[in-house]
């Protein structure tokens, strides 16, 4: 087993408010995951290709919700389902924005394998779609330095109808690349959908082989060309390691995510139970729309009206009414004075 470096909490990390959730005791893998890991890879083509990812929108389940394949082109396809009692899709939507700016947050997720995570843009806010996360971690015993490029779900073929209600389902979508080379080598999707008593996460990975390509319009040097060839020869057991790592980290975090969310989400606007309806004519309509979204993601579709869901929106409306009333009062006074 490779000696893992820079995992675990430091003395300074334990000073963080959320450090009480740090626990190196990992939850045992679910029986269905253990069964898959004990067997051999499933047959080539048993899992859908990346271009067919939107099959996740369909209700129900596929025949293979947890498995992996080694494809003939050198790529691996992997699928893992994780049951999460007491967890909502919104919690995971929040988590993917919140954890990415500090190593100590990232390490909560998998204390024995996660090393570091920072946003490429250097900012520290709770958003992730349209941003790149620079991470270092161990996939079982393999060290990985990756650039996780989060994308809007529609870019991966998912419909507006599928993503419009985050209380029912959230799709976390990303291109996976190397952080030290201008190379992307795969895709990932985590669909978190609500079920009775909580949620379930259906994770999918497409890595290596046909999924390797240069980022943007970069020119491949001899070094990066060599790296591409290495990536195409992805280890035959990497699918097994990917399932192990994903199952471990998702189970581990799900166990305390509800409590962490309630405690650390205080700065994010809360649901306003007695929310009112705000029409498009409302002067701050656009801002209010964006404030109802954790990730401030503009889908480009504007409803004719929205239901106010935040304390901030309610206060803004109240302040606007008070200001308008004061202005009307001042106008009446001026009119009355001018007519004396």
Image (cartoon, rainbow, N blue to C red):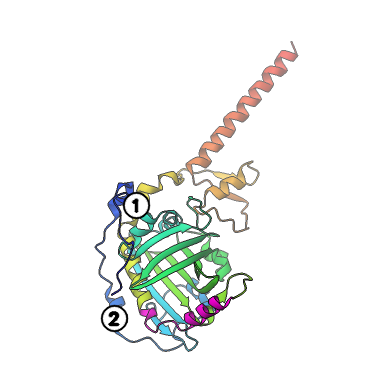
On the rendered image, what quadrant is the C terminus found in? top right
Confirm whether the magenta stretch covers residue 11: no
Chief secondary structure of the magenta portion:
helix
Toward the top, the furthest residue is 340
Which dot marks residue 260?
A: 1
Q: Position of residue 30 (x, y in %)?
A: 28, 72
Of callouts 1 and 2, the N-terminal one: 2
The answer to whether one can see residue 288 in this image is yes
Q: Is residue 292 left or right of residue 65?
A: right
Q: Position of residue 270 (x, y in %)?
A: 44, 46
Toward the right, the furthest residue is 339
Label 1 Cα crowd, 10 Å radius (few <14 / some 14-19 / many 20+): some
Residue pictured at 53% horizontal, 76% vertical:
223
Which picture quadrant has residue 332?
Answer: top right
- Give the extent of the magenta segment: 221-240
Q: Position of residue 80 (x, y in %)?
A: 38, 74
Which dot marks residue 35?
A: 2
Which dot marks residue 100?
A: none
Residue 321 sits above or below residue 230 on the image: above
The answer to whether one can see residue 169 in this image is no
Confirm whether the magenta stretch covers residue 222: yes
Q: Position of residue 272 (x, y in %)?
A: 46, 44
Residue pictured at 52% horizontal, 43% vertical:
276
Toward the front, the furthest residue is 222
Residue 230 sits above or below residue 154 on the image: below
Q: Nearer the viewer, residue 180 or 335?
A: 180
SS for tag 2?
helix
SS for tag 1?
helix
Residue pictured at 55% horizontal, 33% vertical:
319
- Residue contact at pointers 1 and 2, CB within 8 angstroms: no
On the rendered image, what quadrant is the N terminus found in? bottom left
Give the Cα separation between the discs numbered 1 and 2: 31 Å
């Amino acid at each position: 087993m490779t000696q893992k470096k820079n995992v675990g909490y430091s003395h300074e990390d334990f000073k963080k408010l959320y450090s009480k959730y740090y626990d190196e005791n990992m939850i045992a893998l679910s029986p269905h995951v253990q069964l898959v890991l004990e067997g051999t890879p499933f047959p080539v083509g048993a899992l859908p290709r990346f271009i067919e990812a939107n099959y996740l929108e369909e209700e129900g389940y596929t025949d293979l919700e947890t498995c992996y394949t080694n494809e003939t082109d050198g790529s691996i396809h992997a699928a893992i389902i994780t049951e999460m009692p007491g967890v909502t899709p919104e919690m995971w939507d929040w988590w993917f924005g919140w954890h990415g700016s500090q190593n100590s947050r990232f390490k909560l997720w998998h204390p024995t394998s996660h090393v570091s995570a920072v946003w490429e843009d250097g900012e520290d806010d709770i958003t992730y779609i349209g941003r790149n996360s620079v991470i270092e971690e161990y996939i079982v015993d393999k060290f990985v330095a990756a650039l996780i490029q989060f994308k809007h779900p529609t870019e991966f073929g998912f419909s507006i109808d599928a993503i419009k209600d985050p209380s029912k389902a959230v799709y976390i979508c990303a291109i996976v690349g190397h952080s030290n080379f201008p190379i992307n080598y795969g895709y990932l999707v985590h669909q978190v959908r609500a079920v009775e008593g909580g949620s379930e996460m259906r994770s999918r990975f497409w890595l290596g082989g046909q999924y390797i390509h240069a980022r943007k319009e970069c020119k491949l040097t001899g070094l990066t060309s060599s790296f591409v060839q290495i990536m195409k020869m992805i280890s035959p057991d990497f699918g097994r390691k990917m399932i192990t790592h994903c199952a471990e980290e998702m189970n581990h975090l799900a166990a305390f995510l509800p409590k962490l969310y309630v405690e650390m989400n205080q700065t994010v606007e809360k649901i306003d139970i007695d929310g009112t309806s705000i029409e498009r004519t409302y002067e701050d309509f656009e801002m209010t729309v964006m404030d109802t979204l954790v990730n401030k993601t503009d889908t480009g579709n504007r409803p004719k009206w929205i239901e106010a869901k935040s304390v901030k929106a309610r206060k803004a409306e109240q302040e606007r009414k008070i200001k308008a009333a004061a202005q009307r009062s001042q106008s009446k006074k001026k009119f009355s004075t001018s007519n004396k």
